Amino acid sequence: METTSRVGAQGAAPSTTSTSEASVASEGGPAARRTVDGYLRASFPWYGLDEAFTGPRWLMQVGTSADGTVQHGSTGHGDEPSIRADASTAEKERFVAVVTVAASPVRRSGDGTGVLDATSVSSAAWLAGSGLLAYTWPPHLDYSLRDHWLDQQTEAAFELADDLDGPEWSALSLPVDGVPTPFHYRESEYGWVLAGTTGAGVHLGAYGRGMSAYGLGFAVIRDITTYT
């Protein structure tokens, strides 16, 4: 699969930022995300929900390659989700995270040590799927079982992202900068995930819970510093 894969966001894992949205859980949640610096270093536009959404907007995290190049990241909308929500809490949470992935071909890594994977819509699907898992924790599991459960579910998310034409996915058209755009969409007991490609040289993924994906719209973020 052409993806920002589990080997470290198209190459070696960076030392200061995560290469997978799922690592939000291990990095301490919201407090570990609060910086706009990485977003400002990106060479591609960031996407979020369009102006029809009037709720809170917040920064999540960016992923970089070994040479520090920003390659993907996420922005949050609505309630900041709990990493370990029980059933009653999860039902009350209403949030959408939008994942922006720079479209890139196969290329040499910046440090010359290997080849970086190309990115595709599957990359966005994988990051969105693993992102949703970061905020999913069945209430009957204790800490000792968390890693095992997460490994199993992350593997499943990776396989699903590699089969976007499979039966687990359906088609959904949503506006991106006002233009109807096709997305791959799936639901699970934990929330929903979607992924598509824009005309601006980026792939988009999104995941959420408590807010329906139907009726959402996406747009370029004109000023990322408005996200707190």
Image: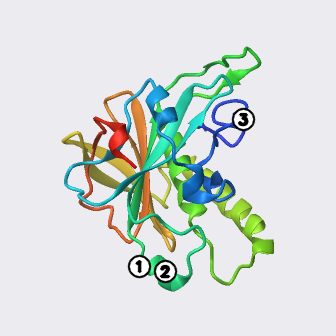
Image marks 3 and 1: residues in contact by CB distance under 8 Å? no
Query: Where does label 1 land, which residue?
Result: 92
Residue shown at the point (38%, 27%) measured from the top left = 201
Amino acid type of the residue tagged 2 in the rendering? Thr
Question: Which amino acid lies under the numbered mark 1 shown in the image of this protein?
Answer: Lys
Q: Residue at x 50, y 34 (%)?
A: 37
SS under mark 2: helix
Report the amino acid beneath label 3: Ser
In space, the residues marked 3 and 1 are separated at their CA atoms by 35 Å
Rendered position, 17 above or below 77: above
Considering every residue shown, the one lying at the far right of the view is 144
> What residue did someone put label 2 on?
89
Q: Earlier in the sequence, mark 2 or mark 3?
A: 3
Horizontal side, residue 222 vs residue 115: left or right: left
How far apart in space, not on screen, are marks 1 and 2 (Cα)? 5 Å
Q: Do labels 2 and 3 touch, CB within 8 Å?
A: no
Q: Position of residue 91 (x, y in %)?
A: 44, 80
Q: CA distance from mark 2 to mark 3?
A: 33 Å
Q: Are marks 1 and 2 in contact (CB under 8 Å)?
A: yes
Element marked by disc 3: loop
Q: Secondary structure at mark 1?
A: helix
Q: How is the image coloured?
A: rainbow
- From this viewpoint, is residue 159 visible? no
**What's the mark number on residue 15?**
3
Compare residues 197 and 38 and report the one nearer the observer.
Answer: 38
Residue 97 appears at what percent x and percent y?
43, 54
